[in-house]
């Protein structure tokens, strides 16, 4: 299959690698030249423009930072919706707000194009291993059309509901992740102050009721969990800026349905303040620096 891929950042690049490895022709575009540099080494082809990347594509996948980027890439005169061939399948894997996801899907439907919102969980490691979880919003029959391509990049493909529902599920998930990495940071800072060895504390909590995915995979203390960014000076990974964005999206979503999320609100405030102090490009687990003061 010919696949157009827009957005070859931390997540997009390993997704391109897995698609190319499975035998697909992947034509990739990113507005950043440095993000495109590694595309050839992972088996993809570099396009000189978004239009060139999608002109022969049967499927187009986007992996962009936020709603405004998705709107810019899909909408407007030069956008995907106006420029892909009839019958092209559109899959947006970015994490964005529910409203923009629904808007773009409606614009695609008006041109008779199949579209899904399919944000992912599993991080860069999951993208590299092809074990991402896809949370999919859109018609079920479109998901069945997309499934063979999604299976190349992910292990769990879950239909969340109508358009925008994948984003709703993702925002709920990331609000939990943000809260749990803060809880993990607080426990390890306090534990060390109480004289506990962090490795001992990790071993104890791993088999106790406080254990969580954030601690097991992204422990903010170095030298214990191999996949953690704390071992690499908090090089992202999933950046503070992205987590702050997702926590703010969760607050917008919570407000829109009058859901009470006191810890989600506090997590959004902590990340936003940490981001504003120049930490936006660090891995999200670097929030321990703010907790330890
Ligand atoms: P990233 O910033 O590394 O990559 C995004 C890429 O999009 C960049 O290379 C940027 O240049 C490109 N881009 C932006 N606007 C563009 C445009 N108009 N045209 C072409 N390219 C454009 O971000 P990432 O970490 O890969 O995350 C991408 C999405 O996946 C985000 O929505 C994020 O929330 C989500 N996500 C990330 C992770 C993670 O662990 N990094 C995990 C799950 C979900």
Image (cartoon, grey):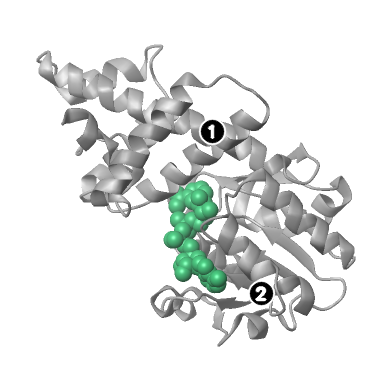
Label 1, on which residue?
Answer: 251
- When the figure is inspected, residue 288 is found, relative to residue 238, above or below; the finding is above
Q: Quadrant of the N terminus?
A: bottom right
Image mark for residue 268? none
Quadrant holding the C terminus: top left
**Is any part of residue 187 visible from this angle?**
yes
Query: Where does the image place residue 268, in percent across and percent down from the top left?
Result: 42, 34
Mark 1 or 2, nearer chain start: 2
Q: For the point 68% across and 53% down, which residue is it?
A: 151
Residue 21: image location, x then y, percent:
58, 69
Image position of 56 (left or right of 240): right
Where's residue 14, x and y in %?
49, 62
Residue found 24% across the figure and 47% down from its top: 277
SS at mark 1? helix
Q: Measured along the vertical axis of the image, is residue 268 above or below residue 135?
A: above
Q: Quick check: marks 1 and 2 in contact, CB under 8 Å? A: no
How crowded pointer 1 is (Cα within 10 Å; few <14, some 14-19, many 20+) is rated as: many
Residue found 64% across the figure and 35% down from its top: 169
Location of residue 212 with respect to 242 vertically, above or below: above
Residue 13 visible (yes or no) = no
Image coords of residue 242 (percent x, y): 44, 49
The residue identified by callout 2 is: 4
């Amino acid at each position: 299959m010919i696949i157009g891929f827009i957005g070859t950042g931390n997540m997009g690049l390993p997704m391109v690698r897995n698609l190319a490895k499975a035998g697909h022709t992947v034509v990739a575009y990113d507005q950043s030249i440095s993000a495109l540099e590694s595309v050839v080494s992972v088996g993809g082809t570099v396009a000189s423009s978004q239009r060139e990347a999608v002109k022969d594509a049967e499927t187009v996948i986007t992996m962009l930072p936020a709603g405004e980027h998705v709107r810019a890439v899909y909408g407007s005169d030069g956008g995907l919706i106006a420029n892909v061939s009839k019958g092209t399948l559109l899959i947006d894997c970015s994490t964005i707000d529910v409203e923009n996801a629904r808007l773009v899907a409606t614009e695609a439907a008006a041109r008779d194009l199949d579209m899904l919102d399919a944000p992912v969980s599993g991080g860069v490691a999951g993208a590299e291993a092809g074990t991402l979880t896809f949370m999919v919003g859109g018609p079920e029959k479109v998901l069945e059309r997309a499934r063979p391509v999604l299976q190349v990049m992910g292990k769990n493909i879950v239909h969340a509901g109508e358009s925008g529902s994948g984003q709703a599920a993702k925002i709920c998930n990331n609000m939990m992740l943000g809260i749990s990495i803060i809880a993990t940071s607080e426990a390890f800072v306090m534990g060390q102050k109480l004289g506990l060895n962090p490795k001992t504390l990790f071993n104890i909590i791993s088999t106790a009721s406080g254990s969580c995915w954030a601690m097991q995979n992204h422990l903010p203390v170095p030298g214990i969990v191999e996949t953690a960014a704390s071992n690499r000076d908090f090089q992202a990974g999933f950046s503070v800026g992205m987590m702050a964005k997702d926590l703010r999206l969760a607050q917008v979503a919570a407000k829109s349905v009058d859901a009470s999320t006191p810890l989600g609100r506090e997590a959004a405030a902590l990340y936003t303040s940490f981001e504003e102090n120049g930490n936006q490009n660090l891995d999200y687990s670097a929030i321990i620096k703010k907790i330890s003061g």
